[in-house]
């Protein structure tokens, strides 16, 4: 009888472990999720590294930039800050932001930190990041962002900021050109309310 009880306990424990493991497995991402981009590892302005796919679960804004930019990127960041203020006013919540550098050769943690200080942004709400591994060209392609180096340094590039839903699907985009677009702000507020 004692052996039977031990076998029964072992079987129940094994079933429980299997159920726990199955519950811990994340649901598969939809085919249109940007988080399906082959493994991309990022490091932020505070030196914290994380996988791009780990951002799943929360709506957020995503864009690209480079830290030494003197024109489009500062306008992009200031526009995002305007958007954040408008969203907070409308919903009482903030929207997390991730910007990925397309100049990882120069944008080390120190450069990212300096840019964060210059623009008055801080982690974890506003992450300035660079890729440690992975294909940022693919990320740019999915977002509709292109860049090319200029002969005297810097880059010619466009700006797109995307609103991602919690599974990483692009819901709306904005050119972040100096003003908070009310339609983009409304899309963010709707998405935040839908995930409450």
Image: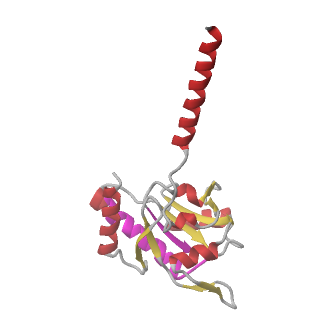
- Which image quadrant is residue 51 in? bottom right
Above or below, 93 relative to 164: above
Q: Is residue 168 magenta?
A: no
- Which image quadrant is residue 65 in? bottom right
Above or below, 50 relative to 153: above
Q: Is residue 149 left or right of residue 186?
A: right
Q: Position of residue 57 (x, y in %)?
A: 46, 54
**One can see residue 35 in this view:** yes
Residue drawn 57% across the image and 77% down it: 140
- Which image quadrant is residue 41 in? bottom right
Residue drawn 69% across the image and 89% down it: 152
**One can see residue 102 in this view:** no
Residue drawn 61% across the image and 8% down it: 1
Q: Is residue 82 magenta?
A: yes
Q: In the rendered structure, which segment of residues is drawn in magenta?
A: 60-88
Depth check: 168 or 43 in front? 168
Q: Please, which colouring scheme is shown?
A: secondary structure
* Numbered circles on residues, count: 0
Depth check: 164 or 108 in front? 164
Q: Position of residue 106 (x, y in %)?
A: 70, 73
Depth check: 173 or 126 in front? 173
Depth check: 87 or 187 in front? 187
């Amino acid at each position: 009888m004692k052996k039977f009880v031990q076998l029964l306990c072992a079987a129940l424990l094994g079933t429980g472990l299997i159920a726990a493991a199955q519950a811990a497995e994340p649901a598969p991402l939809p085919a249109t999720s940007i988080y399906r981009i082959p493994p991309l590892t990022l490091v932020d302005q505070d030196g914290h590294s994380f996988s791009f796919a780990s951002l799943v679960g929360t709506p957020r804004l995503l864009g690209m930039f480079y830290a030494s930019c003197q024109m489009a990127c500062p306008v992009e960041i200031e526009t995002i800050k305007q958007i954040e203020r408008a969203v907070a006013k409308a919903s009482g919540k903030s929207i997390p932001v991730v910007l990925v550098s397309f100049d990882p050769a120069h944008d080390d943690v120190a450069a990212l930190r300096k840019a964060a200080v210059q623009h008055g942004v801080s982690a974890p709400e506003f992450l300035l990041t660079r890729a440690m591994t992975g294909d940022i060209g693919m990320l740019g392609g999915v977002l509709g962002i292109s860049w090319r180096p200029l002969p005297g340094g810097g880059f010619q590039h466009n700006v797109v900021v995307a609103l991602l839903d919690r599974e990483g699907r692009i819901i709306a985009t904005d050119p972040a050109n100096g003003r908070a677009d009310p339609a983009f702000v409304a899309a963010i507020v709707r998405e935040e309310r839908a995930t409450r």
